[in-house]
Image (cartoon, grey):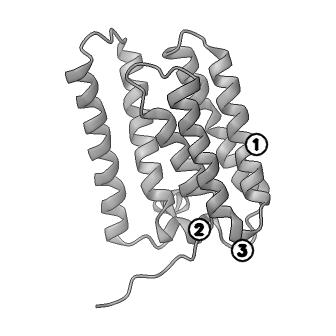
Amino acid sequence: MAGAWDKFIGPGATNAELWLELLGALGLTTVLTAINFTKRANLNWTIGQWLVFCLFAFDLSGGIITNATAAAKRWYHRAGQRFSHHFSFVVVHGLHLAAVAWLFREGDWLYFAVYFGYLLVGTAVILRTPLYLKRPLALLFYSGALLLNSSILQTAVGLEWFIPFFFLKLFVAHVLPEAPFQPQNE
């Protein structure tokens, strides 16, 4: 089990990284849930919708943190990792978009198609771009996702955070390679 966990978050994660990942994900999930309970008492979600909401809040907030750690950067951007590895990691997250379209947007498949298409194009372009342009390009694509979310496609009530967290996790935290610094003994 420990080996599978290492392959998920990156082998060699420090205790500080592990605690940050866990407490950050739990903290953000708690805050997002509390916001919906206190500000939106009329959501009328089913238990299944609440479970998916909590799962996505935990996965995306934890994923933003985890994918930004040095351990994850060393693991996911190690020698031998190709376009197909990163692209398939991102494609699987299309299930998040499909679930939101189905469960929270009454089968709004245009929402799914627009965001999934944007995800695929953005990921492919970022991955194929020279290293020195990857970060600014990822931030440009992330900004475009924020504009889509705030100005073009109506957000689902209670999930206003979903698209910003989703694209932050994938475009900025996961796809971007970075120098994975080791902690220094102080």
Report the disc number at residue 79: 3
Q: CA distance from mark 2 to mark 3?
A: 9 Å
Callout 1 amino acid: Val
Residue positioned most to the bottom:
186
Callout 2 amino acid: Trp
Residue 184, compared with residue 92, is above or below; it is: below
Nearest the viewer among 127 and 85 is 127
Residue 182, image x, y percentages: 46, 82
Residue 100, compared with residue 122, is above or below; it is: above
- At label 1, counting other C-alpha atoms closer than 10 Å, the crowd grade (few under 14, some 14-19, many 20 or more) is few
- At label 2, counting other C-alpha atoms closer than 10 Å, the crowd grade (few under 14, some 14-19, many 20 or more) is many
- At label 3, counting other C-alpha atoms closer than 10 Å, the crowd grade (few under 14, some 14-19, many 20 or more) is few
Q: CA distance from mark 3 to mark 1?
A: 24 Å
Name the side, left or right, on which 27 lies relative to 90: left
Residue 142, image x, y percentages: 58, 46
Nearest the viewer among 70 and 109 is 109
State which mark lies toward you, 3 or 1: 1
Callout 3 amino acid: Ala
Residue positioned most to the front:
151
- In terms of sequence position, does the residue under pointer 1 or pointer 2 come before the other? 2
**Tag 2 and tag 3, C-beta contact below 8 Å:** no
The secondary element bearing badge 2 is classed as helix
The secondary element bearing badge 1 is classed as helix
Report the disc number at residue 9: none
Give the labeled residue for mark 2: 75
Query: Which residue is at a point 69% across and 27% down the rendered structure image?
Result: 114
- Residue 137 occupies quadrant: bottom right
Looking at the rendering, in which quadrant would you find the C terminus? bottom left
State which mark lies toward you, 1 or 2: 1
Report the disc number at residue 121: 1
Name the side, left or right, on which 168 lies relative to 43: right
Name the side, left or right, on which 129 lies relative to 182: right
